[in-house]
Amino acid sequence: MDAVIVDTNVIVIANDTDDERADCRDLCQDRLEQILFQGETVVIDDNWRILGEYEDNVNPNARKKGVGDIFVKTLLQNLKNPEICTMVSITLSAGNGTGFEEFPDDPALSNFDPDDRKFIAVALVYENVHQQKATLLQASDSQWYGFREELVRNGLEVEFVCEEYIRDLYERRQGN
C-alpha cells in the first residue's frame, strides 16, 4: 500500500476559491481524491501536530465542505483504520517545539522551516518502522522546492503536486 504525508498547503489549496490558482487547486483536489479513493494511506504523527495544523486551516464540520475539509474529516473518522490513516511517533528534541530527533542532521537542511520539520520526521520514522517510503506531498511552499535535492539526498521522496506553480514561485523568489 502506498503511503503519503500531506503538507497542509495541499489541503488548503484544495479548498481554495481563488481563480489565480485554479490549476493548482484542481491538481490538489484530484490528488486528495486519489488518496481517498485509490487506497493510499495518510501518515501523521500520534501527537496530532500534523492533524492539529490541518484542523487549524480547514473546517471539516462546515455545512458546505471543500475537498480539503472532506479529506480532513475522513482522516478524523478513520484514525484507527490503517488502510486510511497510519500514525507514527516522532520525538521532540529540546528547544521551541519544532525540532525532532528524527530530522536529518544535515547542515544543508539547517535553514529548513522549523514548522515543516514534523513532516520530514514523520516520513523518516514511517520508513524505519514500515520498511517503505511515504511520499511527501507539497503544493505551494517554494522553500521545499529549493531544498528538493537535499531532501532526496536524505532519502525522502517529495511529490510537487503543482510543480509548475511551485517552480515559478521559487524562481521569482530567487530573482530569475
Image (spheres, grey):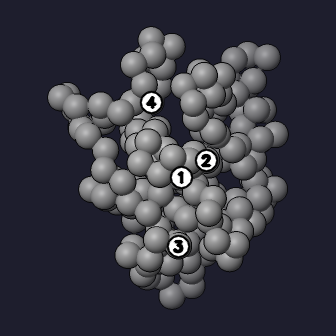
The three-letter amino acid code for the residue at tag 1 is Ile
Mark 4 vs 2, N-terminal side: 4
Residue 7 location, x and y as percent?
Answer: 53, 50
Q: Secondary structure at mark 2?
A: strand
The residue under label 3 is 83
Q: Is residue 89 above or below residue 107?
A: below
Q: Is residue 101 above or below residue 176?
A: below
Is residue 135 rendered to the left or right of residue 38?
A: left
Q: Nearer the viewer, mark 3 or mark 1?
A: 3
Decide: few, some or many residues near mark 2? Use Cα within 10 Å; few <14, some 14-19, many ≥20. Answer: some
Amino acid on which disc 2 is placed = Thr
Q: CA distance from mark 3 to mark 4?
A: 30 Å
Tell me the amino acid under the disc marked 3. Answer: Glu
Which residue bears the numbered disc 2? 135
Q: Quadrant of residue 166?
A: top right
Q: Residue extending furthest top?
A: 107
Q: Nearer the viewer, mark 4 or mark 2?
A: 2
What residue is rendered at 76% in x and 32% in y? Answer: 167
Mark closer to the observer (3, 2)? 3
For disc 4, the marked residue is 113
Q: Which of the two residues, 96 or 3, is positioned nearer the viewer here?
A: 3
What count of labels does the image hold?
4
Q: Earlier in the sequence, mark 3 or mark 4?
A: 3
The answer to whether residue 59 is visible is no
* Marks 3,2: beta carbons within 8 A: no
Question: Which corner quadrant holds the C terminus?
Answer: top right
Q: Is residue 26 above or below residue 71?
A: above
Could you give the CA–CA distance between mark 1 and mark 4, rounded to whole angstroms?
16 Å
